Amino acid sequence: MIVYYENMNGEKLNLLKAPFRTTKTDWFDADWSESSDGYEKTVTIDVFGKREEFQSNMEQLYRIIAVDAENDAYGKLYVNGAYLRCRVLKSAKEGWKGYVYSEVEITFQAPELVWVVEATRQFFPQLEETAASGIDFQYDYPFDFAGEKRGIAAWDVDHIIPSEYRMIIYGPCVNPKILINDYPYEFFVTLESREYLIIDSQKRTIRRYLTNGTVQNLFNQRAQKQ
């Protein structure tokens, strides 16, 4: 089993490997209590180490888990490939246990009790010859019997509820437009080679990344609903 917490800065805290180990718990069960700000779950972590080593381990623990709450942000709790968007709301040290380790209670807070498994799909430009290929008759016709439409690909998501997404569009291209279930996602921008656009539906952001490291906010350059 793999369980770790990753804060907003990408720092990871392995919760099943010394010097930090959680007691036996079912991360996916219904033991998440509902609160005014979402859902909460308290777990106990054993922090190992002698006096000096213990102090260093405790500093590492608090450095990783405190940054999200201090910045009003969320990290991710990973369990076997799935993650829950959450942060550590509070912690409390219970004291020494036989001068070998100490118990620390930490309370996770999640805005939504939704475990996420990410899936990735890449779409590449189709060649004109490939897109126009189809049935070849022995007689000439003034039009082609194409077997597929250019620029169309299928991706079936086997889930009962809508999913958030993170779309990346690479240049070069002008005013890219993508149709998903007949809904147009269009952006009025010219992307040069090695530039790209990231659309994050969960964060509601549209950002352009230039080759010189500059990041531009293009939220107002998106096509509006008519």
Image (spheres, rainbow, N blue to C red):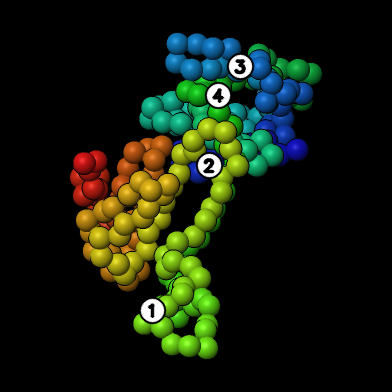
Which residue in the protein does label 2 denote? 11
Q: CA distance from mark 1 to mark 2?
A: 58 Å
Q: Position of residue 174 (x, y in %)?
A: 25, 65
Frontmost of labels 4 and 1 is 1
Which mark is drawn over residue 143? 1
Q: Note whether 191 is above or below 220 in the view shown.
A: below
- Residue plotted at (51% across, 28% down): 86
Q: Note whether 179 is above or below 7 in the view shown.
A: below
Judge left or right: residue 84 versus residue 151: right
- Residue plotted at (39% across, 44% down): 200
Frontmost of labels 3 and 1 is 1
Compare marks 1 and 2 and give the one earlier in the sequence: 2
Q: CA distance from mark 4 to mark 2?
A: 22 Å
Task: Name the image quarter holding the C terminus.
Answer: top left
Residue type of the residue flagged with mark 3: Trp
Which residue in the protein does label 3 denote? 32
Which one is nearer the viewer's eye here, 140 or 182? Answer: 140
Residue type of the residue flagged with mark 1: Phe
Q: Quadrant of residue 132?
A: bottom left
Q: SS class of the residue under badge 1? A: loop
User: Mark 4 touching mark 3, by CB under 8 A?
Assistant: yes
Q: Position of residue 133 (x, y in %)?
A: 49, 78
Frontmost of labels 4 and 2 is 4
Which residue in the protein does label 4 denote? 113
Residue type of the residue flagged with mark 4: Leu
Q: CA distance from mark 4 to mark 1?
A: 54 Å
Task: Name the image quarter holding the N terminus.
Answer: top right
